[in-house]
Image (tube, grey):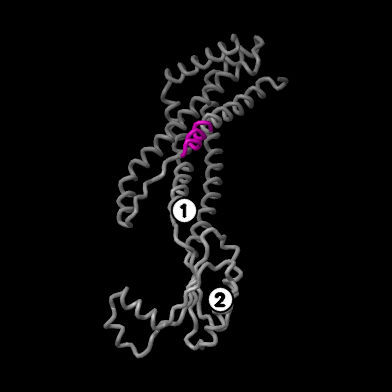
Amino acid sequence: MKYLARHFQVFIHTLGNIFRHPLPTLLTVAVLGITLALPIGLYLLTHNLKMVSSEWQGQPKATVYLKKQATDQDVARLENWLATQRSWIAQVQFVEADEALEEFKVMSGLGKALDVLDQNPLPNMFILHMPETLPVAEYQPQLLQLEEDESVDQLKYDLEWVQRLQAILKLAEYTVWMIAGLLGLGALLIISNTMRLSIANKSDEIIIINRVGGTNTFIRRPFLYSGFIQGILGALLAWGLIKTGMNWLNAPVEHLAELYASDYQLAGLPLPVEIGIFLSGGLLGWLASWITVSLHLSKLNPSK
């Protein structure tokens, strides 16, 4: 109980010192809050982009465009081959060029304009529907084999843009972690600089405590609490900045979603991430203070 009471007493005393000299603390907290808010904002951006991409619920589909010179025998040969590929093809749909042109006339509203064409510019095509639960890697080699067929002019896969987006998001995740690490190092330096100034102001007091037998742990304790409190306050400011930014962006995001007939809303920070923000801020403050004070004490009394 006495041990906890001493810690509580030091914590209250440190908190009082911070409120008695608020300006240096406010400057440190402001810089720390902005430093922490940057990687959190980037994480929130990638998190929302992930949610947008995951809302795509269409069935994977590939369109195989045949060459204009492809014969009926070529079409029959491809139909027979596709019939043997039911392990990765859920449905095969053959669309003749004339049928495709008539459908395009209806959908585009250019029926009369297209009637003046001397010949049908559209080719015959196969539309392949793949199971939604089947990974792309399972049938990617077969698609490549089909694309190299002598009768195939072009193959379009409707999920290519989703794959590219997922790859970009994966790269963005690694970038966020790299930036978070660099900014975390910057936060350590910021708090360390504040601690150096605080140590310099109390250098005589530290020397006296050291000379009368005060342990390094006893000397270090108030600085550790000071760094921890500054880290928590910086994390609180970062959390507030992110919340304010989200509230500011909610209205334009909802308006943009309405234009695309969607009810999408910005996703907030998950609870584990919010807890992690405060834990990270407190840990950074504590670690920076511990390193700075320990270096100072090692110079003051190398034998300890």
The location of residue 52, given as percent across then percent down, is 43, 53
State the mark number for residue 54: 1
Viewport quadrant of the N terminus: top right
The location of residue 36, given as percent across then percent down, is 48, 38
Q: Secondary structure at mark 2?
A: helix
Q: Is residue 271 part of the magenta span, yes or no?
A: yes
Name the residue at the right extreme.
Answer: 303
Whether residue 178 is visible, yes or no, is yes
**Badge 1 amino acid:** Ser
**For mark 1, does the 10 Å Cα neighbourhood hold few (<14), some (14 to 19), or many (20 or more) residues?**
few
From this view, report whether residue 223 is shown above or below residue 120.
above
Whether residue 199 is visible, yes or no, is no
From this view, report whether residue 148 is shown above or below residue 261.
below
Give the spatial CA distance, label 2 vs label 1.
28 Å
- What's the residue at 65%, 21% (across, down)? 300
Viewport quadrant of the C terminus: top right
- What's the residue at 47%, 86% (across, down)? 68
Discs 2, 1 touching: Cβ within 8 Å: no
- Magenta stretch mostly in which secondary structure? helix
Q: Secondary structure at mark 1?
A: helix
From this view, report whether residue 208 is shown above or below residue 157.
above
Q: Nearer the viewer, residue 229 or 119?
A: 119
User: Which region shows up in magenta?
Assistant: 270-279
State the mark number for residue 147: 2
**Badge 2 amino acid:** Glu
Relative horizontal placement of residue 61, taking residue 112 as reference (left or right):
right
State the mark number for residue 62: none
The location of residue 264, given as percent across then percent down, is 37, 49
Examine the image and state in which quarter residue 233 appears.
top left
